[in-house]
Amino acid sequence: MTKKSVKPRTARSFAIAGVGEILAFVARRGQDAANRSDLVIVDGALALPRDSEYGSIHRELQFGERCTVLGQPLTAMWGDHNDCFHRKITGREILGHQTRTCWAAGKTWKAAFADANAHLDREIAKIVEIVEERRKALADAEEE
């Protein structure tokens, strides 16, 4: 038996002022099906803050078709809505957030985790960029 070199689960958070925290999780799933490959699989999850008043994602993140994250436009009902699967990935219930998942594969756990984290980082960067663009547009509108 070999020593586990990568933790079975990782969690990170990214704060966006006035919106809340975006949470990113990656967890080991296991080895791919024997008839497909010998790769190891990890699951990733991205959790976006909810608007406490309506239960949908925060209004400042509802960009619709202007921004697609993990293959789904940022509409009010963005997310997978599969709480059991999300708890398995995150290790806990995530209150106040809506979650969508992805997965990655690699020859090693380290490679699979790196791929999943890089994918989630790219998705978070899209959100941060469009939020900043929107805020800049409002600030620019004030200039004469």
Image (tube, rainbow, N blue to C red):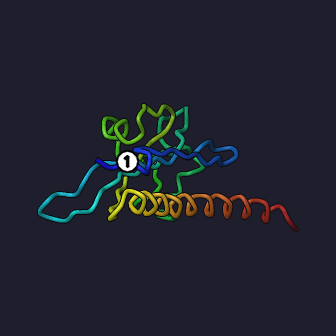
Q: How many labels does the image show?
A: 1
Residue at the image point whose x is 74% and y is 63% from the top: 136
Residue at the image point whose x is 67% and y is 60% from the top: 134
Number of other residues with Cα within 10 Å of mark 1, as a class: few under 14, some 14 to 19, many 20 or more = few
* Type of the residue with mark 1: Lys
Name the foreground residue: 14 vs 133: 14
Residue identified by numbered label 1: 3
Pinpoint residue 94: horizontal percent, then vertical percent: 46, 34
Residue at the image point whose x is 11% and y is 63% from the top: 35
Residue at the image point whose x is 43% and y is 51% from the top: 5
Given the current orientation, which residue lies at the most extreme left position?
Answer: 35
Pinpoint residue 68: horizontal percent, then vertical percent: 46, 62
Given the current orientation, which residue lies at the most extreme front position?
Answer: 1
Name the foreground residue: 2 vs 87: 2
| Horizontal relation, residue 2 to residue 70: left or right | left
Pinpoint residue 73: horizontal percent, then vertical percent: 43, 59
Name the foreground residue: 102 vs 79: 102
Pinpoint residue 113: horizontal percent, then vertical percent: 43, 57
Given the current orientation, which residue lies at the most extreme bottom position?
Answer: 144
Q: Is mark 1 on a helix, strand or loop?
A: loop
Quadrant of the rendering where the C terminus is positioned: bottom right
